[in-house]
Image: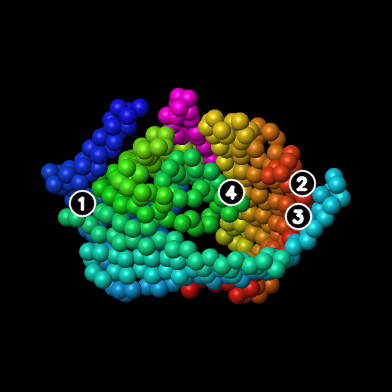
Amino acid sequence: MMHKQTILRSLFSLILVFLVVLPVFAASEDFLFEDNGSSDLFGTDMLVQEVGETNLLLDDLLLSNADGVQIGGSYSFTVTPAWSKDFDTDASRSSLATKMNATLDFDARPDTDIRIYGRADVAYHQVNGSDSLSITLMELFSDFSVHDQLFFRVGKQTLTWGVGYFFSPADLLNVNSINPFDAEADREGAMAVKVNMPIGMDNLYGYIKVPEDANDSSDLAFAAKYEKVLGKTEFGFGTFYQDGKDPSAMITVSSGIQDISLFGEAVATYGEDGVYFQGTVGNQFSWSSSESNLGFTFVGQYNYNGKPTAIHNHLDHAAAVHTTFSLTDSLSFGFFYLGYLSDFSGMLKPSLSWSPVDYIQMTFDVSFPYGGFGNNQFTTFSLGFSLGGTDF
């Protein structure tokens, strides 16, 4: 076992040295970059994107900003009364939840050589008379380049490897997993050093992650990833190693057919009982009418978790679906489903949202668990009021 760990540690060290040394001997004049407006300058959250060339230097695209410093954020306030009933036992209960959430971020670009970005979340929740307050530093990092060839991100940052929407087994580096009930929620970043070397339209990445429970250098995690673009399809190949954890290798694919986005992930992990696999496939589709406010979105995904503990808990096969129908500019209908196919348990959740005026929205939803999902047999009816929420 010790010999295997020594070999793996040496392999990752060689990969990181390769990332730093290679640009000294080979320079490229054509680089790709597309800024999608997010905090991640070295990637995009889009499943499918058009790839094009640019005549601008990559460091100008990454780091130049005439505004110097930009400050923004968001605020939300919701009040949600709910009533739940177990129709098998005739038991019932009620609740009242009040939530305030705010984010604050800044983007400082002193010159074309460096960028500083930070984001913090403040959340205050009150449920049935009990309250809680949390302040979380989500991200705080700097971006800089070396000779327009190596691009560094140093600090607390979101490390998103996977391409999945509800499930992402290939997301080996992030601190928190995706919550299927709130798949688009921001997730807390990890302390890490990320190095990106563009190779034409492709990208090579190296990572050193500092886990939250790290005591010394032996607790560091190492990872490397290569992204290959072929037309409208992007492939990702990555490896992950950390002492005390099972080493993993992954592959991701994202592509599309007309207006349908397709994505998939596969992970192979070497554990005590041998190699086990995890994987997911899914698709996403959006449509909107050019003559009215009608619109439709659909996301569906299947996930397989071959980890032995997951199989023992009957959670090895799962599926999730989310659809939204926009009927007018103020009225929409949604449907969410999450199910574990091995033990036939899951949750159905239809919802109806109406925004009569700006900054006021009402959402009525019903949660139907079945098959002992989450040890919960209560059907819940809730009416949420969102007041004064906005981005700034």
Q: Position of residue 158 (x, y in %)?
A: 41, 54
Q: Which mark is residue 180?
A: 4
Q: Earlier in the sequence, mark 1 or mark 4?
A: 1
Magenta-highlighted stretch: main secondary structure? strand
Q: Position of residue 297 (x, y in %)?
A: 59, 52
Q: Give the image's coloring scheme.
A: rainbow
Residue identifier under label 1 = 149
| Inter-mark Cα distance, 3 to 1 | 54 Å
Is 98 placed above or below 312 here?
A: below
| Inter-mark Cα distance, 4 to 2 | 19 Å
Q: Secondary structure at mark 3?
A: strand
Relative depth, front residue between 217 and 194: 217
Q: On the picture, is 257 further left or further right than 147?
A: right
Q: Which residues are magenta?
A: 266-284
Is 344 placed above or below 183 here?
A: above
Residue 362 visible, this orientation: no
